[in-house]
Image (cartoon, helix red, strand yellow):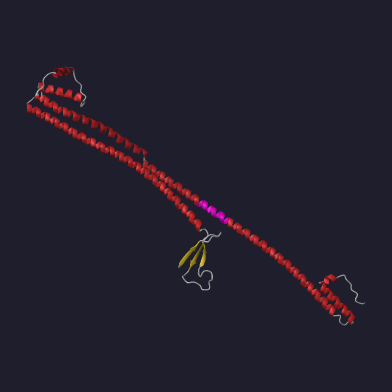
Amino acid sequence: MRINATDINNKQGMFLYINSDDKTDQNDKSDGKIGRNIFGGNFNQNLDINAKVEQKRKQAQKQAMKLIMEAVNKDKEALDARNELTELRDQKVAEVIEGNGSIKSFEEQKEQLRQQYGVAEDSDEQKDLELLQKYQNSIGGANSENFTKEELDRLRELQNAPRTEYQNRVLEINQAQVTAQNKVNKSEQEIRALSAGIYDMKSEQLKSKTMLEAKESADNLIEVTEDEIVGMLVQDAKDKVDEKAEEEKEKAEEVAENKEEQEERLEEQKEKREDLEELLIGAVENSKLKQEIEAVQSVPNSVADAKAAIFNMLEEQGLVADDLKGIEIDLNF
């Protein structure tokens, strides 16, 4: 079956021409096609409202998806920032571990030198060295040290006193250890700051509930859109009902006009029929009068001739029997 759809511009709407086969009728002088027309009426209107509904749904889905994607991107940005801080903190932790390893190595080196030089742990040389290291650590900022009065007095004495080779070598190692300790201290401070930032970001994300809020907003958007679609469909149905009512009203008015015209035509026909009846009655009366006149043929010829002349005159004048009522004619002349 071949189906040809032709959009005809008329007030009724659209017609679909359906051709049942590929044959043509030779007797069809229009365009050689066989088929039947199906009224499409409101096809375009139905297509329009369906397209509007589909378009509105797509817009709502697009906006809902935008809300979700914005929330996803926002969470991703927060996660990326938190991961960046976490990665940086891990680097600082690694630096602290490495620095502590260096400090431990420096301590081992100093112990090896003590044993190498044979310095006793409780000797004055070792005690003076430890006091000098404490002072070196304090000046270098590696540790916050407190000194007693006796220690301060001894440091003044050691300031100008010569040092042993063992003490100088240990103080060199200790200076490197001070540098390493400062780096460790700085890294630990950064670790604490980074950890606090990571914690705050996690807390903020938990409070914001971005995805949950976005989903609720998207759901509300879809719900509102569906309500609007229902309103559109209801309004469209009302419009169609009003349009149908208007069409029915126009048809009723047209029927009333046709009825009035028919009544006028009937009245005209009735009047014509009455006129015809009057003419027929007149013709019958004329015929009777003629017959009466012809019936007096037994009267002398002069009277018959007179009657015939009168009858001819009546016919020429178009008079009927009713016109002669009350008129007496004396034929005895």
Q: How many marks?
A: 0
At 49% from the left and 55% from the top, the residue drawn is 48
Residue at point 63% right, 58% down?
A: 253
Residue 166 vs 255, above or below: the answer is: above
Q: Is residue 291 left or right of residue 256?
A: right
Residue 291's spot in the image, x, y percent? Answer: 82, 78
Residue at the (39%, 42%) spot, across then down: 213
User: Which span is picked out in magenta?
Assistant: 233-245
Q: Quadrant of residue 254?
A: bottom right
Q: Quadrant of the N terminus?
A: bottom left
Magenta residue check for 77: no
81, above or below 53, in the image: above
Image quadrant holding the C terminus, namely: bottom right
Residue 66 versus residue 42 in the image, above or below: above
Left or right: 191 as drawn, with respect to 223: left
Residue closest to the eye, 160 or 275: 160
Q: Quadrant of residue 248?
A: bottom right
Q: Position of residue 167 (x, y in %)?
A: 11, 24
Residue 49, position as x, y percentages in the image: 49, 54
For residue 276, what is the image quadrant?
Answer: bottom right
- Determine whether, in the image, residue 243 is placed left or right of residue 51: right
Residue found 48% across the figure and 65% down from its top: 4
Residue 195, above or below 216? above
Name of the residue lying farthest toward the right: 333
Q: Characterize the magenta stretch by its predominant secondary structure.
A: helix
Q: Position of residue 322 (x, y in %)?
A: 83, 70
